[in-house]
Structure formats: structure tokens, C-alpha cells
Image: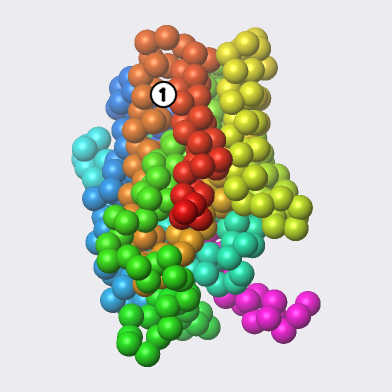
Amino acid sequence: MTNKQKTLLVPLMIIGSMFAVLGFALGINAFFVPFVKKAFNISITMSYLVMTATFLSFVVFGLPSGAIIKKFGYKGGMIIAFMIMAIGFYLIAPAAKIISFPLLLLALFVSGMGQTLLTGAVNTYVSILGPEESAASRIALMGICSKTFYAVASLMLSLFMDLTNVRLNDTILPFYIISGVLVVMGILYYFAPLPEIKAAGEEESGDEIEASVYASSKTSIFQFPHLLLGVLAIFCDIGLEYIALGSINDYAAKLSLPSPQNYVWFVSAGMVIGYILGVLFIPKYVSQSRALLLSTISGVVVTIAILLFPIGISIYLVALLGLANALMWPAIWPLAIADLGKFTKMGSSFLVTGIIGGAIIPLLFGYVADTESYKFAYLVCLPAYFYIMYYALSGSKIRTKK
């Protein structure tokens, strides 16, 4: 291990633990979708409002989160994010006590605000922490932490909450615990050895030499088409990820399979395998854009297979969607913030707003599942895969074209 790698090791370990928290926080939604459907006796479509509430905050709080990171730095933004998430999860307890679905959605929205801020800070931080061409590899490594703890959320909540015997009061104790842990973690991160870093050309002082000629000629964030197209790519990617991660437990419950809360592990395992492949092969054997292209092709093939195979097999093919989706986020993020220079922090807040796809696309999936069938609903994925394919082939490369 080189001295530079040793220097990066501690910050990466700290950021990896934050990715784990993000994964856990979002994994709560996968458990809540079938839980609230039974607890409040609502439709599949309505139950997916759990995801809508969380991901809506990424649009509402996306740009303010960029301002917070700019003012307090990446580390300061991360600490503030933990406190906001703690408040959101704390509010779940009173929502359960008074049996209020709107208050539950509000609690998830507040938690989502914290997740918005943390997502923008940690992804950009790990992208600029090392060489640009290996950014996807580092984010993939972080993704292993994230998606492992996404599944851990279902495992932990199942210790307190039973999907076969749903009781809202069972949510009170675990979310008091989660809220308290988040506060303690935020305090510990304040003292963590996490250096403040900046992207090339991010300093706005007159003495700073702009490392990116491309960015130096720009006066507005809206003059970066590869970033704006990247926002839509993130929109599609997050929608795809959380269709797979958020639907499989409910799909298993609908099929009356044993221990339906554990099926999210199949998708998470698929994503972790994909992340490991990213760590091993990017950029040594395959570029970030080529990895993105291969991922979208795989996603199209698996989606069509879900429709064609018998229902008993199709649920396991959803796990392969996890594998196909794994490297899309790690590839899209660094491609979209490349050459932003002094606009990097603002660019990250723009990208975060694309996460609203996790609210809209799964909601559309839930509607089709309600009106048609689960198998047919997965066809909602195809247009999203085709757009990300365009971004890999052309959209992300606009800045390099003369």
C-alpha cells in the first residue's frame, strides 16, 4: 500500500460508515412499504408514498443542501445531516401513537432532508478524494457499505415489527433507538479526522489557478449540459434501484412466500456483487462510461426476462436487477460533476434533486402493479434504462465535444 493510499484509508473508512447509515435509512422504506399497507389498510400505490415522502425531500431540500455544504464544508454538512435525520426518525414514534399516516409521511420527509444533505456531501467528497478516473471504483466500494446496510434495516426492524402481525406501536421503540444512535454518531463525526478537501478549481479566490479550462469559461451552473443531463440520469437510476429494492419484499408477501421481509437481501446481494466488480475492474479494465453502458444493457435484458419467465422464477430475477443497477450511480455521479471547477458543490446539489426519481418511478410501478400485475409493472424500468444508455454513450461526453 502506497503512502497516498494510506492517507486515503481513514477518510474512506469514515465515509464508508456514513454510506452505511444512508443505506440503512433508505432500507427502512423497503420494510415500511408492506408494513404500512397492512397497518393503514391502503393500496399498493398508496403504500409507495413511503418512498415518495422520502425522495420528495431530495427536490425540496436539494439546492438548500448545496448552500449548507458551501457554507459549512463537506464535514459540517455531514454532521448537520445526521441531526436532521435523527429528528425525522424521532417523529415516527408520535405518528404511531396517534395512528397518523400523514404524520408518518412527514417524519420520513424530514429524515429525507437529512439524507439529501448527507448524499450530496459524501458522494462528492469521495469522488474528489482521489483520481477522477477511479471515482466510480471508490463510490462502488462505498456502495457495498450502503446496500449491505439497506438489507440490515429490514433485518433489524423485523426484530421489533412483524409483517404478518402488524402493530403500529411496535415502531416506537426501534425509532427512538435509531434517533439516539444518529445523534451520537453525529457528535463522534465532529471529532473524526476528516480533512476538508476541494475539487480542482473549486477555490474562488483570485490567486487560485482554475484547473478546468472548461469550467473557467462558464458563468452559470446551467452552462454544463453533461451535469443537467446527469440529473435526469440520476432520476432514472434511483427510480430503477428502488423499484428493485423496494418492491421485492412486497412481491414476496403477495406470493405468500415465507419470511417476505428477507427477500431484499437478494437485491442487496446482487448490488454488492456489482460493486465488487466495479472496484476490481474500474478503471483498470473498463472505463466509467463503458461500465455504465454494460449496466444498462444488462438491465434491459433482465427486465424483459422478468416478464417472460414464470412468476415463481421472476421474483429471483429482481435480484439480478440489483446486479445490473449497481454500477450506474457510481458511474453517473463522477461523470456528471467532471470539470465543474468552482461549481462543484452547487453541481452536487443539482444532482441530489434527481433522486426524486426514487419517489416518482416506484409510485408509477405501484400503480401498474395495482392495475395490471407485478410482472408487468417491471416494464416501467425500460424507458429509464434506455435514457441512461444514451447518457453513457453521448450525454456524459458533451463537454469533450468541440
Q: Which residues are magenta?
A: 1-21
Which coloring applies here? rainbow
| The N terminus sits in image quarter | bottom right
Q: Amino acid at mark 1?
A: Phe
Residue 7 x/y as whole percent: 64, 81
Residue 5 x/y as whole percent: 70, 77
Which residue, as the protein is rendered here, is positioned at the far bottom? Answer: 207
Circle 1 Cα neighbour tier, 10 Å, few/some/many (<14 / 14–19 / ≥20): many
- Residue 141 visible in the displayed image: no
Residue 263 x/y as whole percent: 60, 32
Q: Nearer the viewer, residue 97 or 183?
A: 183
Q: Is residue 227 above or below residue 162?
A: below
Which element is circle 1 on?
Answer: helix
Q: Residue at x 37, y 71 (%)?
A: 216
Horizontally, is 21 left or right of 76 in the view? Answer: right
- Residue 235 visible in the displayed image: yes
Q: Give the prevailing secondary structure in the magenta stretch.
A: helix
Q: Is residue 278 above or below residue 15?
A: above
* Quadrant of res 208: bottom left
Which residue is labeled 1 in the image? Answer: 365
Residue 3 is inside the magenta segment: yes
Residue 393 is inside the magenta segment: no
Q: Nearer the viewer, residue 369 or 70?
A: 70
Residue 40 x/y as whole percent: 30, 27
Q: Residue at x 22, y 42 (%)?
A: 103
